[in-house]
Image: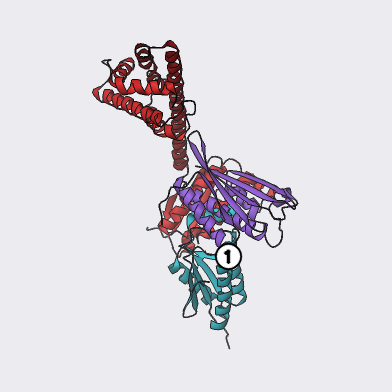
Amino acid sequence: MSSTVETLQGSLPVRTEEDIVASRQKVRALTQQLKFSLVDQTKMITAASELSRNTVVHGGGGQMRWEILEQGLKRGLRLHFEDTGPGIPDVQLALTDGWTSGGGMGLGLPGSKRLVHEFDLQSTPGRGTQVSITRWK
Amino acid sequence: MTQQSQAVLGLLAQHEEQIVSEWLQEAGSASSRMTDAQRRTMQGEAAEIVRTVRSALQEGADPEDFRAQPWAPLREVLEGLSRSRAAQGQSAGDTSVFVLGFKRPMFTALQRFVADSRDQLAAVWTVSVLVDKMAQWTVTTYQQTREEIIQRQQQDLLELSTPVIKLWEGVLAVPMIGTLDSSRTQMVMETLLQKIVETGATLAIIDITGVPTVDTLVAQHLLKTVSAIRLMGAECVISGIRPQIAQTIVHLGIDLEGIASKATLADALSLALRQRGYVITRTA
Amino acid sequence: MYRIPILQMGTTLLVTIQVDMEDQMALALQDDLANKISTSGAKGVLIDISALEIVDSFVGRMLAGISGISRILDATTVVVGMQPAVAITLVELGLSLQGVRTALNVERGMELLAQSGKESEIVVNR
């Protein structure tokens, strides 16, 4: 395992199943560098896994962008999951527990939302979806 | 690099010792109330600050953009200074006063050694901007450090108020006292699950005698905790449900999803022992 | 694609998941287990996830799936060794895996399987 210092921002493609695994590993490296507690690392990595999968399975593939945030001395990690897929027709519905589209997306969004401090979802049918999640140390 | 920065650099290069000793004198290092150790620490801090200012200016850093990369070493030095003083209980004022004391010796030196009065003014302005930023940074760090200390104390308080007790071989008990909110729940879950792993417990009794009210939110937190305990291969019993709470739970239609409940912690322990095949007899 | 190996010990199938699984791997495991239970007539399945630092909804549903499938095939599944951080996260995600039996470690898991084996014995008295 290399001991590279993670850059303040970057991105990686999320198009295949292998990419979902890669995104988990990337988020692990980032949260470890930010010295998140084990539980917080686990929550962030798991949320990233859920959203990466959505991007691959429902978004037709896209990318994960990350930013290391600094607010005074508070540090955090923000991840953006972006695709140019079909989009989500009813965002409000997607964020309510129990909603399903195309095979079990029901638990993905509301669940992921509970794992992070900040959650933002923008989606335009026919244009694509961007989900941003943030956790602070 | 601007001319002003050049001038400041030049001054620091040639007259560092004098500037620093004037600075330390301002900061009260000559005072008899200061111990030798304190004096030495202050000397070290001043030296570090001057060193990092010089290196940043050498890289062409602009004091207006204090968050830029070249200022990072200086920021770190200021953070260290601030943290140690916050930990010692000194006030934010004390901390920034030290940093601000850098101005006067610099102004004096500039007046003495920079001939042109317009250059002087420009250089004085640069120093002023820089030192103000340095002072601001120390104050921000100071506040952050105090907040961290408070948070740590809150955490300690939280841990102390929700102890996980080993009641018997394989049986843990958590007496909850006070309102059950989400951060409390997180804390309980983490501690309890960790203890389950450490002790190999198969039963966790959560006693809510000390919980004033149970509404849908609190019930959700309890359910989450129970689910997590079950995922670790242990069972969970809730004890200490007062009659009013039982009424509220039914009234609100909260489904406790088959969680066993007992009126008192004693009942729960008694049941647990029986289930494990223990028989308690009194001698004579 | 790497398939997770399934060990057979008597009437128990033992699986230790030690890699960060791709989705296909998890599905393959579910498939392989269903087949193996069927062909071997196994009565118990022990899945050791003590090395898994991340269990997301996909893997969670796979575990619930195996649990249900094994039940239909007259076998019991026990998932052992879930890490505390994983349990907390799964619950927060909304997966309580209610139908899945769990135990702290392999030893306890085997005890559980032995117990449930006895429970499901049909005793015929003539």
Above or below, B211 relative to B26: below
Q: Which residue is mark 1?
A: C23
Which hue is chain C drawn in?
A: cyan
Q: Is residue A56 left or right of residue A92?
A: left
- Disc 1 residue type (three-letter): Asp
Locate residue B70, reporting x and y percent.
Answer: 42, 33
Image-quadrant location for residue C58: bottom right
Locate residue B106, reporting x and y percent.
Answer: 37, 17
Above or below, B205 relative to C9: above
Above or below, C15 relative to B175: below
* Along the line of sight, the residue nearer the viewer: A51 or C112: A51
Q: Residue furthest bottom?
A: C126
* Chain under numbered label 1: C
Which hue is chain B drawn in?
A: red
Look at the image and tell me in which quarter the N terminus of chain B lies: top left
* Along the line of sight, the residue nearer the viewer: A39 or C28: C28
* Along the line of sight, the residue nearer the viewer: B31 or B227: B31
* Along the line of sight, the residue nearer the viewer: B207 or B181: B181
Viewer can see residue B198: yes
Which hue is chain A drawn in?
A: purple
Locate residue A133, reporting x and y percent.
Answer: 59, 46
Above or below, C71 relative to B162: below
Q: Is residue A97 left or right of residue A116?
A: right
- What is the image's colouring? by chain
| Residues packed near mark 1 inside 10 Å, few (<14), some (14 to 19) or many (20 plus) | some
